[in-house]
Amino acid sequence: MAVKLQKAPVVKECIGCDNIDGDVCRIWATPAAKWRLGVCASATHVKAEVKTEAAKVRVGQQKQKKK
């Protein structure tokens, strides 16, 4: 016999996600825990930010003179 877990209601960050059924999340039992450390991994309404490092630009370099 399977034990059915009681699901907690969604938090305000979850509003707009496609994984919401009524007032509970279809994927996570406690959606607040997924938002505690940042963006929920299953959020369909949040665009992932990709951090890229700026290209290094070398300024003020001169060629060496040949003697």
Image (spheres, rainbow, N blue to C red):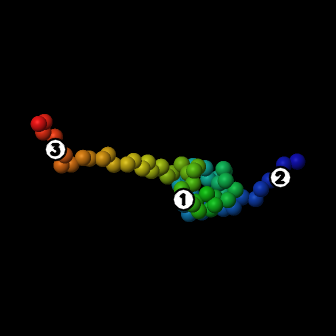
Mark linked to residue 3: 2
How far is disc 1 from disc 2 in space, using C-alphas? 30 Å
How far is disc 3 from disc 1 in space, using C-alphas? 46 Å
Inspect this view and state whether residue 23 appears. no
Counting from the top left corner in percent of width and height, residue 51 is at 42, 50
- Residue in front for this viewpoint, 23 or 54: 54
How far is disc 3 from disc 2 in space, using C-alphas? 73 Å
Mark linked to residue 38: 1
Q: Which one is in front in this view, the residue at disc 1 or the one at disc 2?
A: 1
Residue beneath label 3, please? Answer: 62
Q: Earlier in the sequence, mark 3 or mark 1?
A: 1
Dot 3: what SS? loop
Q: Earlier in the sequence, mark 3 or mark 2?
A: 2
The structure residue drawn at horizontal position 62% and vertical position 53%, both measured from the top left corner, is 20
Q: Residue furthest top?
A: 66
Query: Disc 2 residue type?
Result: Val
The structure residue drawn at horizontal position 12% and vertical position 39%, both measured from the top left corner, is 65
Quarter of the image for residue 66 reads top left
Dot 1: what SS? loop
Q: Categorize mark 1 by other alpha carbons within 10 Å: few (<14), some (14-19), many (20+).
A: few
